[in-house]
């Protein structure tokens, strides 16, 4: 049973796990969440702009949105993170100080916004054309009809996809370590990796992995739950009612209201 | 701005309307290179109802969309209360013209009341409270006061269409356009909506009604227009068209639908 003990020592060295646990929570988990949530918030805001530009009747807005999306969706995340994290380091230093942390968040936000923009665009375009037409027919401007009626419906539809995107961001946030973070800025992966070097086995990384799963797995199931709820609607089953009942009701109403019987 | 707004007749409690005149002058409309409406001229006197009948693909719906410029005309002109609609900003024009669609197009995540109130505050600039108050009145007019807080999906097709009519009426339009307003309804609910429309016509609304309900056209219309292949083939009083169709195409059409 030599191989079994090797596996145990490599992946499930509970001593090493316990040792790294406080740091994983206080530093790693905290930073992973800060990075992911900030990138998601910025990504949602930028993504909405990209989506609205992408469905604009004007090519001057549509084409730049298309190029932006193609660019950030088409490049590997690690490449974008390095290009932005190192390319703008000088500029970032004068604004945020020496830490590459903010640039990491920005790079992740840009990548996220490209995906989220596509999610929003698909959602908005899936809204029945009649909705926009009804708004326009009432005298609403294009912008108002989008803002008050079409976009909210589209966004509601893609909430599950947005949660999926958040999960992807959580995982991509591990790439920020490439930029070289300060000790207190390390996210889950980096904390696990540093501890793995000290312990001489992979157990701290396994522990970090457990934390990723703690974030992502419940969200995945939450998505599935919401998805089925959104699809079926909140409609409670009601007993079928005869259309004639409504006719009776109408006839009972004042003939002045319905305009009948005159 | 315009003399034609609806007012409340307090003596009977029944709202009366003062619809505007509508005039189409050789209106031509196209989708890309394909002309779907050619040189259509039409006069609708204030407070009268004109029904447009004809086979599918005859350009009836396109005509309505040209009137409120949901689709821009290629050439020709439309006059609302004697004034060219092409010189009015489309948003302003549309706030003066009500439109009712075949598939209702209610906003699904708003209640019936909010459906009616939305344009009142966002377009007419009413306060939200005043908009809700006005919306409530409008829903009462179509017999749906008690359904104000229902969501569209909890309403029958007939009720949804009446909400849509209330939504258009609340804007106090000068003209109402109906695009096959009863075609998507269950048969037993058609009459209720048609009665409501007939009532609007009697109370002075100018109406342009695209319909397949020949009974309605015969009974309610002041003028019936038969269209085919993007042109007006024949127009006149209901009696003229239904009892003495002159053109072969109308005779053929009537023999198929009656």
Image (cartoon, coloured by chain):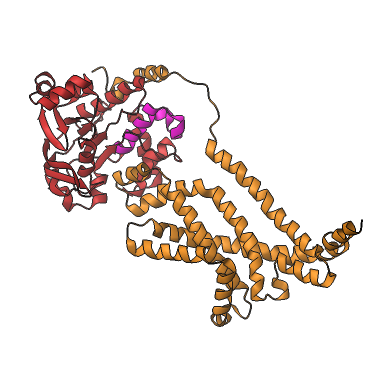
Chain colours: A orange, B red
Residue extent of the magenta highlight: B143-169
**Along the viewing direction, whichever of B254 and A103 lies nearer the viewer:** B254
Vertical side of A255 occupied by A145: above or below: below
| Residue B168 appears left or right of A102 | left
Give the quadrant of residue B212.
Answer: top left
* Residue at x 35%, y 19% (from the top left corner): B188
Q: Answer whether residue B11 is visible to the viewer in this image.
A: no
Q: Is residue A152 left or right of residue A11?
A: left
> Residue, x 53% and y 32% (percent of image)?
A235
- What percent of the width, then of the height, locates residue B69? 23, 47
Determine if residue B213 is in view. Answer: yes
In the rendered structure, the answer to whether residue A254 lies left or right of residue B57 reads: right
A10 above or below A235? below
Q: Which residue is drawn at 88% across and 63% down?
A: A15
The residue most toward the right is A1
Whole-percent x, y for residue A224 in the image: 61, 43
> Where is residue B222, by image quadrant?
top left
* B256 in relation to A222, above or below: above
Any magenta on residue B67?
no
- Identify the image quadrant of the N terminus of chain A: bottom right
Q: Which residue is pictured at 38% across the width and 55% down the height?
A: A55
């Amino acid at each position: 049973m030599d191989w079994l003990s090797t596996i145990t020592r490599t992946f499930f060295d509970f001593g090493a796990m316990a040792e790294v646990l406080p740091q994983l929570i206080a530093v790693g988990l905290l930073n992973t969440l800060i990075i992911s949530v900030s990138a998601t918030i910025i990504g949602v805001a930028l993504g909405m702009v990209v989506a609205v530009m992408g469905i604009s009747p004007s090519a001057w807005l549509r084409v730049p949105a298309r190029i932006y999306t193609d660019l950030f969706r088409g490049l590997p995340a690690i490449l974008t993170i390095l290009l932005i994290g190192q390319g703008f380091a000088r500029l970032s230093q004068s604004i945020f100080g020496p830490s590459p942390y903010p640039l990491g968040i920005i790079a992740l936000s840009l990548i996220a916004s490209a995906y989220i923009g596509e999610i929003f665009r698909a959602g908005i375009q899936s809204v029945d054309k009649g909705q926009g037409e009804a708004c326009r027919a009432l005298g609403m401007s294009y912008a108002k009809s989008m803002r008050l009626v079409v976009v909210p419906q589209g966004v509601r539809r893609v909430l599950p996809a947005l949660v999926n995107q958040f999960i992807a961001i959580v995982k991509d946030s591990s790439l920020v370590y490439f930029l070289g973070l300060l000790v207190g800025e390390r996210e889950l992966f980096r904390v696990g990796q540093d501890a793995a070097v000290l312990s001489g086995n992979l157990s701290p990384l396994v522990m970090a992995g457990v934390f990723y799963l703690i974030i992502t797995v419940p969200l995945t199931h939450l998505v599935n739950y919401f998805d089925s709820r959104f699809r079926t609607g909140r409609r409670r089953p009601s007993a079928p009612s005869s259309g004639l009942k409504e006719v009776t009701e109408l006839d009972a109403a004042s003939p002045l209201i319905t305009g009948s019987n005159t | 701005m315009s003399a034609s707004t609806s007012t409340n007749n307090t003596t009977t409690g029944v709202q009366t309307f003062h619809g505007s005149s509508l005039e189409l002058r050789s209106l031509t409309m196209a989708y890309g290179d394909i002309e779907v409406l050619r040189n259509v001229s039409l006069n609708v006197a204030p407070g009268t109802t004109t029904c447009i009948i004809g086979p599918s693909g005859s350009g009836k719906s396109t005509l309505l969309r040209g009137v409120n410029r949901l689709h821009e005309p290629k050439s020709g002109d439309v006059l609302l209360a004697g004034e060219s609609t092409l010189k009015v900003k489309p948003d302003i024009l549309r706030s003066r013209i009500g439109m009712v669609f075949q598939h209702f197009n209610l906003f699904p995540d708003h209640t019936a009341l909010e459906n009616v109130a939305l344009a009142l505050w966002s377009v007419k600039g009413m306060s939200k409270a005043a908009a809700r108050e006005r919306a409530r009145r409008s829903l009462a007019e179509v017999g749906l006061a008690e359904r104000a807080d229902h969501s569209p999906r909890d309403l029958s097709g007939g009720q949804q269409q009446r909400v849509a009519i209330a939504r258009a009426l609340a804007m106090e339009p000068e003209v109402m356009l109906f695009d096959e307003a009863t075609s998507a309804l269950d048969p037993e609910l058609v009459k209720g909506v048609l009665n409501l429309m007939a009532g609007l016509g009697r109370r002075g609304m100018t109406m342009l009604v695209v319909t397949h309900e020949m009974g309605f056209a015969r009974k309610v219309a002041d003028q019936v227009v038969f269209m085919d292949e993007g042109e007006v083939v024949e127009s006149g009083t209901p009696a003229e068209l239904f009892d003495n169709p002159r053109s072969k195409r109308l005779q053929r059409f009537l023999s198929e639908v009656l």
